[in-house]
Amino acid sequence: MNETDATKVCPLCAETIKAAAKVCPFCQSRQSRWALWQKDLAWAVPPLIFLGGAAAILVWLAPDESGFAARDFARHRNDLLVGQTALESAMKRSEYWLVGFVTNRGSSSWRVQELEVRFLNPEGSLLDVAHLAVHDAFVVQPGREQAFRVDLGRLPPAVVEAVVQVRVQSATDGNLPPRPD
């Protein structure tokens, strides 16, 4: 090798080679910056792919429900049971209220926003469905029950004699402040 030629040391095999060499003549390795990092990073990429996949699976199986939007009620709908419901009528008016209790079997508090009321005839056929907004939204704490009373307004006579099934249609995180109407 001529002494006037600039030289460098191959980072892979430690042999002295020309500075302008693109490939080491001894170990045949490429002499670019990326080629040097490629071997150093080769061991790190598979574990990173594995960790990313594991994180994606965990998020899918157990999503974080503590963010801004809080918990998703649809996943917890079966935690809230509505029971002991009845229709009450106003004495001097032909308007009705739905009264009953909501029991929270879950571990999170919920602010009940809307109820779904199904009116069934004695044979079990569906007569009508009403979605009632709860104007005075109430919070049901975990392991507790909460009474409610919702104004139904005027009802047709066939519906007044019907069997009533009620479920919570929508609720929000009971730990967050109420939504403005």
Image (cartoon, rainbow, N blue to C red):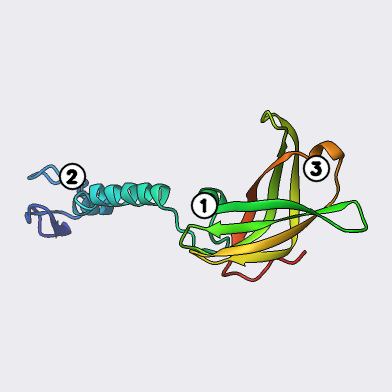
Location of the C terminus by quadrant is bottom right
Q: CA distance from mark 2 to mark 3?
A: 89 Å
Using the numbered discs, state the Cα–Cα distance from disc 1 to disc 2 in whole angstroms. Answer: 62 Å
**Residue 143, position as x, y percentages in the image:** 48, 64
Name the quadrant containing residue 30: top left
The label on residue 76 is 1
* Above/below status of 71 relative to 165: below
Q: What number is the disc on residue 160?
A: 3
Task: Tell me residue 117's x, y (percent).
Answer: 71, 45
The residue sitting at 35% across, 52% down in the picture is 55
Q: Which residue is mark 2?
A: 23
Q: Nearer the viewer, mark 1 or mark 2?
A: 1
Q: Quadrant of residue 110?
A: bottom right
Q: Is residue 177 above or below residue 147?
A: below
For label 3, the SS is helix
User: Of tags 2 and 3, which is closer to the observer?
Assistant: 3
On screen, residue 25 versus residue 152, left or right, reads left
Disc 2: CA contacts within 10 A as few (<14), some (14-19) or many (>=20):
some
**Label 3 neighbourhood size at 10 Å, few (<14), some (14-19), many (20+)?**
some
Q: Is residue 107 left or right of residue 50?
A: right
Residue 142 at x, y = what percent?
50, 64
Expressed as whole percent of the image width and height from the top left, the position of residue 170 reads 64, 52
User: Which residue: 24% across, 54% down?
Assistant: 37
